[in-house]
Each structure stands twice: as C-alpha cells, then as structure tokens.
Amino acid sequence: MADPRVAGYAEALFAVAAAEGDSSVVEDELFRFAQALRSDDDLGSTLADTGLPLARRLQVIEDLLGSRASAVTTALVSMVVGAGRAAELPAIVDAMVERGAASRNKTVATVRSAVDLTADQSERLAAAINTRTGRDVEVRVVIDPSVLGGVVTEIGDDIIDGSVRRRLNQLRESFR
C-alpha cells in the first residue's frame, strides 16, 4: 500500500494544480523535475539537507525552475521542500501524475527514450499503446541515453521493450 503521506501530498498538489489552471502543464513540469531529482543525487541531497537553511534550498529551486516552469510548479516544489519532504518528492509527483491521469480516465505510460519525443510522436505512441494494450494512456517521456534507439515503455508493472538494445540482443541470440 502507498505511503499515506505521499498520497496526501500528491492529492494536495493535484488539487492546487487543478484549481490554478492547466494541471497537465504543471504535471508535466513536476514530472520532469522529479526525473531530474532521480538522475542527480547531488540535487536531491541538497534539497533534502535540513542542515542547509531553508532559504538556500528554496533559492536552488527558484534558480532551477524560475524561468523554466510555471509559478504554480515552482510554488508546489517549494512547498514540498519547505515541509521537509524533498526526499519523497519523486514519489509524490508520481502519485500526483497517476491521480491526474486517472481523473482523465487514462493510465500513465512512462517511456524511456534516448531523445525527447515530439508531440506527434507521443500521440502516435499513445495510440499504438492503446491498440496493443487496450488502455488509454498519457505518455510521460524520460530521457535515458542508455536506450540506444527505440523506446522502453512501462505501464504499471508491464514493460514493452522496443529498444534497439533488445533487438540487437535478440539478433545476437539467434546466431548462437
């Protein structure tokens, strides 16, 4: 079962984003920020370090998000960090994104790709996933250079590996 604190924060973030306007933009910005936290241990440590003054941690958020994200996104990240939950921020954002997708009767498909996908590519991928799985999905892209080409899609516990690496491994196995 999910941590009730994470679920509570996720619900609060979702409610604020919905009340303030375009929740899908805020969800996307928060998702990208959570991915940055996952990939940068120093950033996560800095934001979670209660030995640093809160004003300094909030300044780091402002420096990172100020011109790149909406004021709502920056305020929500600042609220979570200010509450001492920076270490849980990726999990909170994941739960919030899932909540947002569920409110639109969709499921989140996390797609790892070596490059960012265009809007058209995301739409076509969502349609292909819907056809293959029967689920209506929202695609969230994670840039992962280890995926040489193609994409690896995760929908809950299901993984669809359409990566070049997998295809090369299959080809290698067929020659053995």
Image (cartoon, rainbow, N blue to C red):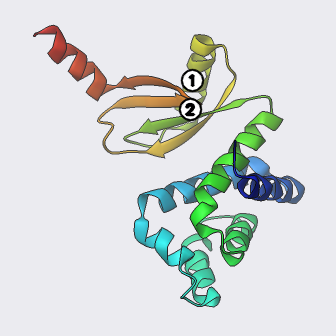
Q: Return the x and y of residue 57 as percentages of the image width and height.
A: 58, 82
Q: Nearer the viewer, residue 47 or 150?
A: 47
Q: Is residue 100 above or below residue 159?
A: below
- Locate residue 10 relative to residue 52 in the image: left or right: right
174 is higher (above) or lower (below) than 138: above
Disc 2 residue type (three-letter): Ser
**Which residue position is annotated with label 2?**
122
Q: Is residue 87 visible?
A: yes
Q: Position of residue 144 (x, y in %)?
A: 38, 45
Question: In the rendered view of the protein, which quadrant contains the N terminus?
Answer: top right
| In-front residue for pair 7/97 | 7
Q: Secondary structure at mark 2?
A: helix
Q: Residues within 10 Å of mark 2 (few under 14, many from 20)?
A: some
Q: Is residue 67 visible?
A: no
- The kind of residue on which mark 1 rests is Arg
Q: Can you tell which mark lies on residue 124?
A: 1
Q: CA distance from mark 1 to mark 2?
A: 5 Å
CB atoms at circles 1 and 2 under 8 Å apart?
Answer: yes
Q: Residue at x 74, y 58 (%)?
A: 5
Q: How many marks?
A: 2
